[in-house]
Structures are given as structure tokens and as C-alpha cells.
Amino acid sequence: MYKIAIKDINTLFSKIAGEQELILPVKKAGQYNFGVYEEGADTEGILTNKTVKSAKDAFFPQFETLYNVKKTITPADELENGEEASGTKIRTKLEVQMEELKDKDFVVFGMRGCDVKAVDVLDKVFLSDPVDNYYKARRDHSIIVALACHEPEESCFCTVFGIDPSDPKADVATWVVGEDLYWKPMTEKGTKLTESVKDILSDADEGAIEEEKANIKAIMDKLPNTKLSLEGWGQGKTDEKFNSEVWGKIYNPCLGCGTCTFVCPTCQCYDIKDYTTKDGIQRYRCWDSCMYSDFTLMAGGQNRTSQLQRFRQRFMHKLVYFPDRYDGMFSCVGCGRCVDKCPQSLNIIKVIKAFEKAEKGGAV
Amino acid sequence: MQGLKDRLKELLTDGTVARVVGWKKGDMPYNPEPAVFTSVDEMDDFVYDGFCGANLSKMMIEATKLEGKTAVCLKPCDTYSFNQLIREHRVNRDNAYIVAVGCRGKLDIEKIKKDAKGITEISGTELDGADEITVKTIYGDKTVNYSDVLLNRCHVCKGKDHMISDEVWGESKDTADQERFAEIEKIEAMSPEERFEFFKKELSKCIRCNACRNVCPACSCRKCIFDNTKFDAQQKANVVSFEERMFHIIRAFHVAGRCTDCGECSRVCPEGIPLHLFNRKFIKDIDKFYGEFQAGKDPEAQCPLTDFTFEDIEPGERG
Ligand code: SF4
Ligand code: SF4
Ligand code: SF4
Ligand code: SF4
Ligand code: SF4
């Protein structure tokens, strides 16, 4: 166990960033978001404030190029001896240029218990067969330094999903205790990282974090949404929940904007598209949202045709389909970001509560 | 609020309207949601307080297509949006019953949360509430002045008169204490480089969630060009800075002359991007070049940008 004075934290960040890429919450134009650390970055408040977007971009970026295809056209009269222009007067050559996979280690600092658990959710999707190479390369090279939640907020409900925000599981775990940040390596990767910054850390006593852990637990206990019941959700509930009339009563204000899916650490849907460049195409992947009208649109026109269906999909996926497919694991980690950011104040907590109310015979 | 709720229930019971578009009580002290109420029972959850910032006029596009009349609660600023939707033939006025509700400014929860985490209770936010509100949190209680935590738009409120109504409910209080174009003038005074840097920094936060567009009453196209799957642009790819800027610039041009300055875009942006700055710059320039014009003030008025007169300025002049 080590510690560093919070006032010196930028020294720690500089040191880490000097040896590998460092991604952490940064304050920019008034908002906290994960970004690459640069000298002079505004890190004030990052130990206690929730980021708007999660750390998901570090592993599965909102936009990435998969490969480029370059087309070269050679007129027949310029062809070298031995080359043949097949029938026509030109020869077209397509050259695929793969995007390089991540091949260097990088550190993500400041992920909370919920964010770390969200990576487990993403792993299920991207690391099971067929393995996603782009994602795997980032996972293999990531070193996660998690941060226990010093000031959980009313939208937090991670404990409902069995997450302990006072004791995040990662390569290194850190705690805010008084004026210091406590630092504890938890894995081999974490120990290696610790070695590289050891000269600016000082030795500390494990006892100090016990009080902080107890405080966090007591706060979680007092928060309004941590007693939410997930009874009735999970494996085997598809028919019952899918056909419920409750959806029709609650979906209406949904704008189909996709804010909830883009701030969510576990939403994993993406679209792959081609963009015409001047000499070929760029094939890229970007996040998609089940709240959008063109989501999984097929040539025949089939996809979800109403906002009710789209709205239902998001919550069914988190609370029923995902557990069905992955041994009961929910794909919500209770981070509360969608709760904070939905422009219409709809969210997964309200959905769960509406079903609970309806099941008890109340009007929704 | 009870009076308003009773009146709306009455409208439902006596058959004046078939449904009510209003706000439904949230599960936290500050998150009521826009909702459609079809029965007196459902109306028990109706609420109207300081957190009812959402502009319900856009919901009337669908609601006024339904059988029977729909009652809608509109704040003073919302009535401009509603008029503009009438002007654009997007709502059916005959199917709407407008309950024009009073307003003493709406609250910005982000401002309250700046120094209040773990909120469990907020009191004093009703229309006839006190000048101070009490915020209870698990970390301790706080009081704040109602007027210190208003949405930015309320500081430049266009006034508390409703531009359209069938009946009026509740007393309003003046909240405009800032110059409407002061922010714009500050930006105009920047050098082009500074200005570009300012907007680049703000827009670099954009996650292209489309909340600004989807909430905007002026963005009522059935299918937005940016949702067109057949158009070769990286429209979902937010980190391509060109696309991200184009989206906002095209949108600002598209709502120019139609934007009522309702402030919804800036209110809903999860990244706190001051989107109203684009639109308000257009409003300022339209005022300057064509004489004062306020979209949504009069549903019959011709917008200068869709009208031609010989007095119109020549291209090339700059605002
Ligand atoms: S639930 Fe909220 S955030 Fe999600 S798409 Fe609907 S309106 Fe947008
Ligand atoms: S659904 Fe909402 S609360 Fe759950 S993980 Fe996603 S953003 Fe967080
Ligand atoms: S802009 Fe004016 S009318 Fe609209 S919510 Fe604010 S104070 Fe009320
Ligand atoms: S609401 Fe904000 S983040 Fe979302 S698209 Fe608009 S500007 Fe971007
Ligand atoms: S652009 Fe913004 S301020 Fe203007 S009408 Fe649309 S939501 Fe309102």
C-alpha cells in the first residue's frame, strides 16, 4: 500500500504519461470526460466527479477505422510486360490497408467500480468467439487504475448489480483519504506500473482505507436507488416482459436520441460503414444506438419500426437478453449516467420501478 | 399546482379534451418527465414545478393527429414554439386546447448539483413557492436562491405573456435580468482565431447523440438528412471533427428564422454545449438586416428569410 498527496497528483500523472499513454478524466469546457493526458490538462475535481461519457472509448472507441481500401487504375498501354488487362482497357487493383492494432501498453486511471465491471460485460461480447481483434488488442495492453467512489451520487445504483464501489477490482485500486490518494497494486500488471512510479509514492498503512471503505458503504446505504429490486428480470423472462403492456405506457416521451446509449459504459452495438475517399474507401466502425430508426435496418426494410419497439429493446437487452445469453449477467452496471443525462428524464430505474408498480396492480 | 391539476381533470371529465400533455412526477425530486395522460386516475401523477423545463409543444405534432382534442400545458416561451409549428403546418390548432401556465423561471439541475451531491429532497420549487429552495442531500442540507439556479434561457426570457392560449393558469414572475445578445456580442468581439478555438473546444465534446436535434421544435422533419442511410457521410462518426461541425452548422442554418430561442437544445445537451449561441447569432443578424423579428410571436407573420422585399439587404454584407 502506497500513497501520494492529492496536491501532487499531476506529478504522478506526468510520470505515468511519460512512459505510456495515460487516459483519465479531464475537465474540458466545463465537463468531465475521459481523454488522453497532456501536460497542463485540467484535472481539478476528477477524483470526485462522475464523467459524462464512460471510459468505454479506451477499449471500444466511438469511431475507429478498420481498414482502408485503395484503388489504383492503370491504363492498358501502361501495363508492364506480362501483365494482362482483363478484357477491358484498364487494370484495377484493390489494395487493403489494415489499420494497425494497439501494440503498446496504456493506462486508464479513474475508472469506478461500475466502469470496471462494465469492461467484464464488454469482454463477454468482444472476446467470445469470434474474437474482435481490435478490442482484444486494447484489452491486452490496458492497465486499469480504478478509483473507489469518495462521493457516490443519488443516480448511482451499482450495488444492485453486486458491485462494491468501495473496493474496485482492477490492476491498481486507489482511494481518496483526507488529503491523500492511496494506491494499492492488485495484479502483476499493477505491480509493474507501481514499480515505475514508486519513487514519487510513499509507503502507507492499509488501515487508513478501511475507514474510507466503511464510509462509502454507509453512503451507498443511504442513497435512494440502491434498494432497487431486480426481481422479475433476468434469465427466462423474455415472453413475460416483452409482451407486457407497461412498455406502451412509458415509452412515449422517448425522443430516440441515443444519449442513454452513448453515455453508457456497457452499450456495445456498432455500425460498420464505408466512406468514399478520393482513391477508395475507408471502412469504419462507430457506435450505433438501438434507439435509432436505422439501427439494424436491412435491405428489405425490416427492423424495429416504432419507438416503442426501440425503447423496449434497450431495456430488454440490459435486463433480460444479456442475462439469458451470459449466465445471468446483467448488462447494466448501475452507473447512473443515463439517469443523469436523458433529456426527457426517462431511464432504466424508472423502467424497473414502473414494472414493479404495475405488477403490484398500480396504474403506470 | 393542485388548481391546475383539478382544472385539467375537469377538462378530461367534461369531455373538452381526450388527453392531456403535461409533466409526470419523477422518481427523484427533480426529474419529472413529459407525459400523455388519458385518464383522471393517471392525472394523479401530474406535476408542475420548477423542474418542468421541457417544452411540450413538439409532442403536439403527434397528439393533434389523434382523435379528439389534446390539452397541452405551455409556458410563455413554449407558446412561441407552438405558434411556429402552426406557421409550418405541423400541428393542428383545432385539435389543441392550450392551457397557458405561469412561470417564474425553470431550474437548472446541473447548477444545483454543482455543490449538492446525493440529493434526496428539494422543496420550494412550486410556482408559488418561496425565493429560496431547500436541497436535502445525504451529505447535508443547503438552501439556494431560486434565481441563482435558473436555466440560462430564463435570464434572457422573452417575457411572460403567452403568445397563444385557450385559458391561462397561474401567476408569472419576471426573470429576465441579462441582456439577450450580450453573449453574442462577446463572441463577435473575439478575433476569428479565438472564435474558432472557442467553438472547436465546445464542439469537441459533442457525442453526436442528437438530443439537441430531437428535442428541437424547429427540427420536425419526418426524416432528418443526417439519418439518411443512403448519403455518403460519416454521420454517426462523431470524432470526425469535420462531420461534427458540419452537423451543427447545417442544423443552425436550417432552423435560422424559425428558431424561437426556446433554449431546449442547450438545456438537454449532455455535454453542456451552448448551442443557443449559433441560433441566437442568426436571430441577432436577422433583427439587424430585416428589422426586429421574433419567430413564433405571430403565427401569421412571414419570416424575413422566406420572404422577398426590395428593401432586403444585398449579399455580401456581414453581421
Ligand atoms: S431514453 Fe432518453 S436518452 Fe434514451 S433515447 Fe430516449 S430520450 Fe434519448
Ligand atoms: S443503462 Fe444507464 S445506469 Fe446502466 S450501465 Fe448503462 S448508463 Fe449506466
Ligand atoms: S424562458 Fe421564460 S417562460 Fe420560458 S421557462 Fe424560462 S422564465 Fe419561463
Ligand atoms: S445534444 Fe450535445 S452532445 Fe448531443 S448531439 Fe447535440 S451538441 Fe452533441
Ligand atoms: S434551435 Fe434550440 S432554441 Fe432554437 S427552437 Fe430549436 S431547440 Fe429551441
Image (cartoon, rainbow, N blue to C red):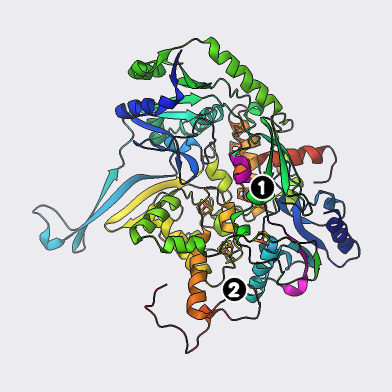
Q: Position of residue B100 (x, y in %)?
A: 76, 65
Q: Return the chain for callout 2.
A: B
- Residue A66 lies, with reference to residue A281, above or below; the image says above
Q: Quadrant of the N terminus of chain B?
A: bottom right
The response on whether ligand 1 sits within 8 Å of label 1 is: yes
Which residue lies under the disc numbered 2? Answer: B294
Q: Position of residue A123 (x, y in %)?
A: 49, 30
Indicate the amino acid at tag 1.
Ser
| Residue located at (36% from left, 49% from top) | A283
In reply to whether residue B19 is colored magenta, the answer given is: no
Indicate the amino acid at tag 2.
Gln
Q: Position of residue B289 (x, y in %)?
A: 47, 78
| Residue located at (36% from left, 26% from top) | A11
Segment tinted magenta in the rendering: B92-114
**Could you tell me which secondary element the residue under label 2 belongs to?**
loop
Numbered label attached to residue A43: none
Q: Is residue A359 left or right of residue A294?
A: right
Q: Are marks 1 and 2 in contact (CB under 8 Å)?
A: no
Which residue lies under the disc numbered 1? Answer: A345
Ligand 3 - quadrant of the structure image: bottom right
